[in-house]
Image (cartoon, rainbow, N blue to C red):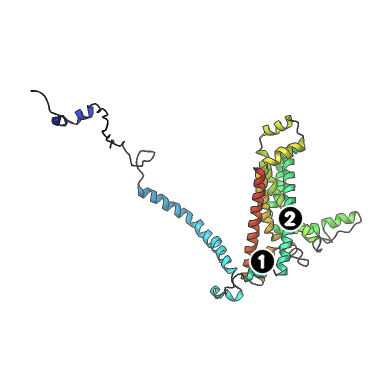
Amino acid sequence: MSSVTSAEQPASGGRAAADAPAEPDVPGKAAVPSIREPAGAGTRTTSGGTPPRPDRLSRHNLAGWLYSTPFLAFFVTFMAFPILATLVMSFTDFGLRNVTNPFDADFIGLENYSKLFGDEHFLRALFNTGYFVVLGVPFTIGSGLLAAVLLNSGIERFRTFFRVGFYAPVVTAIVAVAVVWRFVLDPGEGLIAGLAREVGLTAPDFLGSELLAMPSLIAMAVWRNMGTAMVLFLAGLQAIPTEVREAAKLDGAGAFQEFRRVTVPLLRPTMLYVSVMTTIGFLNVFEEPFVMTDGGPSDSTLTVSLLMYREGFDFFHMGYASSMAYTLFVIILAVTLLQLRLLKDKTK
């Protein structure tokens, strides 16, 4: 009489249903997946437990763009736009007559680029630039590495003084450097000429000789840029663990073997950076011949950058000068990729 039917069980309340034991598995009966989710599921919260508000994110983005606006305006105005304009200009005959109305320039396709490799002045400038790089870069890297090794291990006292002394030419204006080197190389009253007279010799005209003018500029460039290579190599040498050097000495390696087998391999990343940056700088050489020789004598110190300056600002052949600029860019890119490939293979 007091029996309760199954239809009346849910009416006993939600608590009784929650406390009821799980129903045993019955073969052939599909299990019903639970639809209960953990608290807060589907809601992204911050570290404080409160979800970020969209208006707060938008304010942060707006503030970031506002702070970046001065740089972006400067970059677009003085970097991106001139680069793209120069690229377009290299395919035109843009000249002095197009200054007032740039859109009147005629599109001539690849005519400027094809003209370059028939221009004797450009070919001579390209040869001089290669000569400057082939001799200047190895001497700069070698002298900078030698100075760094000596400062790192051989010279204990006055180390800071020598560092500043070697690096001072890097931060010195090219005009001041040119004045000093003109005095040193002057065939009449120069320092070398005076020393030569003391021993009964006659100093040659370094900057007036077609044979000696470019080596003189290379010597000045090496002296001026070796400080940068020295500082970078010195940082690389100080990053080498002392345990590696001590292990090499315990294995019986001498000073030269230690330098060749331990120091040089560990310096390859630094050497790659120094080599790439020095080569790029030397391929763009402009100040040394412009200030010291103006490309002479007889175009023996004429470089691509100097010829580009003449064509663009002396004769105002801007389209032709722009094609020189992008040709030099392609050469720099190819040389840089070659250096990265060669030195990267050696580091594997």
> Residue shown at 63%/67% (left/top)?
323
Q: Residues within 10 Å of mark 2 (few under 14, many from 20)?
A: some
Q: Is residue 52 above or below residue 191?
A: above
Q: Amino acid at mark 2?
A: Val
Q: Is residue 156 above or below residue 177?
A: above
> Residue shown at 69%/60% (left/top)?
287
Between residues 36 and 199, which one lies in front from this camera angle?
36
Q: Earlier in the sequence, mark 1 or mark 2?
A: 2
Tell me the tag on residue 309: 1
Farthest top residue?
1
Farthest left residue?
1
Residue 110 screen position, x and y as percent: 61, 69
Residue, disc 2:
134
| Quadrant into which the C terminus falls | top right
> Residue shown at 14%/31% (left/top)?
7
> Which image quadrant for residue 212?
bottom right
Q: Report whether residue 123 is seen.
A: yes
Relative to residue 260, is residue 345 drawn left or right?
A: left
